[in-house]
Structure formats: C-alpha cells, structure tokens
Amino acid sequence: MKISSSLLQGQQQKVYRRKILSFVHRRGHFTKGQKRALEEFWPEIGVEYQKDIINFTNVFNRTAPVIVEIGFGMGSSLVAMASDNPQYNFLGIEVYKPGVGSCLSMVQSLGIQNIRVICHDAVEVMESMIPLGSLYVVQIFFPDPWYKVRHNKRRLVQSSFAKLVLSRLELNGIFHFATDWKAYAEYVLKVIHSIQGYQNQSSNGQWIMRPESRPITKFEKRGQQLGHGTWDLMFKKIK
C-alpha cells in the first residue's frame, strides 16, 4: 500500500479529469484538529490514489467483506457503521479534505481498526483501484442532487457509473443509495432499471424504508426538521 503525508500539502498529481464532475472542489477551512489528524493519522489510515488495483487484504491487514462509502462528508455515518460492524472492512472515498481530517480524527479517537480512507475522485478510484467483483456493498448517502435540469448531467449516478458499480460488486452485492431529493431518487430508479444485472430490493419497485443499518446523520436530522423527506433505494447484483 502506497501512503504518504503529502495530502495536507496538496502536492500536485497528474491525474485524468473528466469533463463533467459530480462535485465542486471546496477549499474549506481546516480546524486545528482536522489538520493534526491529517498530519498524524493519514499514514496509518489513508490510502493514496494510484492507477493500480489494490489488494484489500494488504490494505486492511485482514480478509473481510468490503463496504465502500462514496462521499462520506465529515465521516459520521462511515464511522458509526464501521464501529457497529467490526466484521466488515469499510473504505471511505471523499474529496473534501477537512471532512477527511474529521473522519480520521474520529477513527483514531474511537480506536476503530476497520476503516481506510481515500481522498480522490470516486469514479477514478473505482475505475483504477477497485478489483472487479470485490465489493460487498457500495453506499452513497445524500450526494449533491444537482437539482437544476441543466445540471442533471453532473449527478454522480449516471448509467456509466451505475454500470461501473455493478462491475465492482460481488454477486449478490448491494448498491445502497439515499437522498433527500425525490426527483433524484426517481432519476436513479430510471437509470438502474435500464441496466441488466440489478434487482430492486423494494417490494413495489421503488424505494425502501430506511434500514436500521444506515445511521441518521446531522444533515438528515436537519432536513427532517425542515420537513424534508428521505428516499432509500437498494439494489442487488444478480448477474
């Protein structure tokens, strides 16, 4: 596993950039704790982006089913799920560096051993680093909905991405998506239903009740207080 402390310094890397990204680069202010966490804990918990397939047994120093969370924000749901499910390995992917620092700080303070973190574009990570048929679950919780019609093309879950996720899931693996924007949920349903190999886990072919395994984040609680709904979609890889 290639690791370094260069993340905080923001050393330039020559990487391929798609013309349309699903996220906006935010400079964000680091708290002292986030900055210290990146400096001290990244070598142990962080995984540098590389254009080579990684070996999960080497990355986690053990063999266990792997759950990937894309866009974990400040890391609260990722940390909670990893803490409650030590039998799984959790890989978090996030581009927001203060959020990565926050996650590392929580992981270290709680002594969690089954989390690793990559700070890079999730599409490139999935394409370059993740082995085919290797993931037990891929979860995306409350991504940017890009709600304006002219921005829909920037949504992370497009047909090409859904096919990419399918290829990295193991047989019977799960793709779990949650949003507080109903139009995005409907959009994802349309995308997934057009792809052979997924089976919707909803009894009515739409969304499911929030599973107890998904923690309610501060972001979601704030939305609920404002009267926002939430929609969970879950799909199984069947071939």
Image (tube, rainbow, N blue to C red):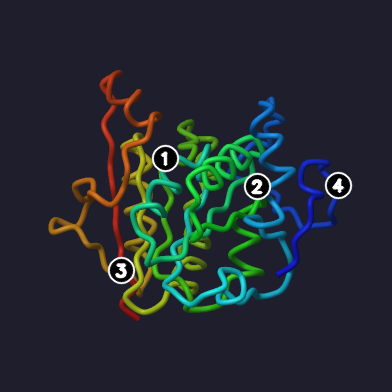
Q: Name the residue under label 3.
A: 236
Q: Badge 2: how crowded within 10 Å, few (<14), some, or many (20+)? A: few
Whether residue 220 sits left or right of residue 148 in the image: it is: left
Q: Earlier in the sequence, mark 1 or mark 4?
A: 4
Whether residues under marks 2 and 3 lie with C-beta atoms below 8 angstroms apart, the answer is no
Could you say where residue 198 lies in the image, as x and y percent from the top left?
A: 33, 69
State how far apart marks 4 and 3 are (Cα).
Answer: 39 Å
Sequence-wise, the earlier of marks 3 and 1 is: 1
The one nearer the camera, 183 or 220, is: 220
Sequence-earlier tag: 2 or 3: 2
Mark 1–mark 4 distance (CA, rounded to whole Å): 29 Å
- Which residue carries the number 4 mark? 11
Q: In the visual, does 178 lie left or right of 101?
A: left
| 218 and 46: which is toward the camera | 46
Comes first in the chain, label 4 or label 2: 4
Q: What amino acid is found at the position of numbered circle 1 in the picture?
A: Phe
Q: Tell me the kind of residue under disc 3.
A: Lys
Q: Mark 1 points at which residue?
A: 142
- What distance separates the C-alpha of mark 1 from that of mark 2? 19 Å
Q: How many marks?
A: 4
At a point 47% along the width and 67% down the height, the residue shown is 163
> Residue 20, which numbered label?
2
Foreground: disc 4 or disc 2: 4
The residue positioned 70% from the left and 70% from the top of the image is: 1
Q: What residue type is labelled 2?
A: Ile
The numbered mark at residue 92 is none
Please say if 167 is above or below 86. Answer: below
Quote the CA–CA distance across marks 4 and 2. Answer: 23 Å
Q: How far apart are marks 3 and 1 (CA)?
A: 20 Å
Q: Residue at x 28, y 52 (%)?
A: 213
Viewer-proximal residue among 44 and 179: 44
